[in-house]
Amino acid sequence: MEFLIQYGLFLAKAVTMVVALLIVIGTIAGLSSRVRKHPKGELEVHRLNEDFEQMNNILQLAMLNPAEQKQLAKEKKKEEKIRKKTVSEKKRVFLLNFKGDMRASAATNLREEITAVLSQAKPEDEIVVRLESAGGMVHSYGLASSQLDRIKKQGIPLTVCVDKVAASGGYMMACVADKILAAPFSILGSIGVVAQLPNFNRLLKKHDVDVELHTAGEYKRTLTMFGENTDQDREKFTEDLEDTHQLFKDFVSQHRQAVDIDTISTGEIWLGTRALEMSLVDGLMTSDEYLVGLSSDADIFEVKYSHRKSLPEKVGLVAENSTDRLLLRWWNRLRSTHYYS
């Protein structure tokens, strides 16, 4: 009996602690959803030349004896003092990073980064966008592409570097650039439009469930998930897809006049080497190779805009990224397993 009493007390304490912990977490989540310290976010700027110089110095020091290391350290310290007092006349390169999901949500930060950079960039400078995206929603990537077009309209040279993938909406963004550089085995293209949805109408009928859909406007709805789809619905849905595809083709043709649009707009993808042959890119090179090559004659500034996320936003972001990964994995399997293994 005494054992049961002790066990009951222990269990009550444990339950109390768990409940208290949940209340604290709930309170923090509620407050964080209402108040944010920096609602407009923060702009971070980092000079990449310093990273390259530091790596070079570490390796250089490792190959010298102690006396030589001491002498080199003095020389570097002297050079650094002179550099800080001297106004640089080098070309400036602004590096932006875009990693896209289905909704191109990174465009929210991209627009702020571009606004900041355009306030300082001059025609003799350059903006480099390191882009990675397998595409997503048409309107979202249309907006992201328009953000990059702001750079072109201001007369600032724009280079897009693709290390992994710029397909579909990702390529819609890349094609805006004056120059596209791709890694030899990166994935590009997929200039097409795809849409699909399940239909549960027969299943619902089997269980005597009726679905009513009322619209004002002949084409307010075409294909639906629960109603009965007609050939007319399918025809209109396909017509809308074809129209979107044509707009996509026109957009690519406008920005990449060297491509044979009918050849490259079939929805196929190409690896970097083949993409060069199709004039989808201008050169084969990784972003690291390009940036290191620029660093001797240019000051490279990596610009990043970010805001502190609340706890509910962080939880939502984890869930969203998990969903995106599942969708992307499914899409990759649907495509060629040779290219997307």
Image (cartoon, rainbow, N blue to C red):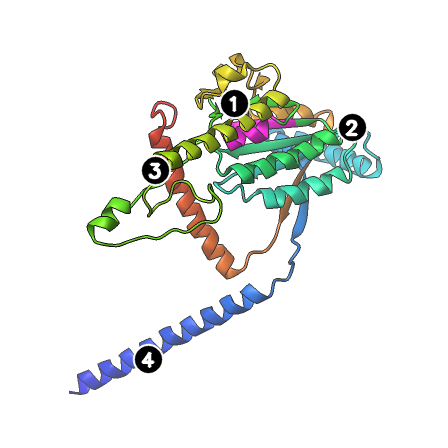
Q: Which structural element holds mark 1? A: loop
Magenta span includes 163: yes
Q: Are marks 2 and 4 in contact (CB under 8 Å)?
A: no
Tell me the residue that label 3 is attached to.
Answer: 230
Tell me which label, 3 or 2, sits earlier in the chain. 2
Tell me which label, 2 or 1, sits earlier in the chain. 2
Residue 67 point in image, percent of width and height? 67, 31
Q: Nearer the viewer, mark 3 or mark 2?
A: 3
Tell me the residue that label 2 is attached to.
Answer: 123
Q: Which structural element holds mark 2? A: loop
Residue at far right of view:
86
Q: Residue at x 64, y 35 (%)?
A: 146
Q: Residue at x 73, y 30 (%)?
A: 153
- On the image, which quarter does residue 13 sit in? bottom left
Q: Nearer the viewer, residue 284 or 299?
A: 284
Tell me which label, 1 or 4, sits earlier in the chain. 4
Residue 226 point in image, percent of width and height? 33, 48
Instruction: Please say if 217 is above or below 154.
Output: below
Task: Answer left or right for 253 relative to 158.
Answer: left
Tell me which label, 1 or 3, sits earlier in the chain. 1
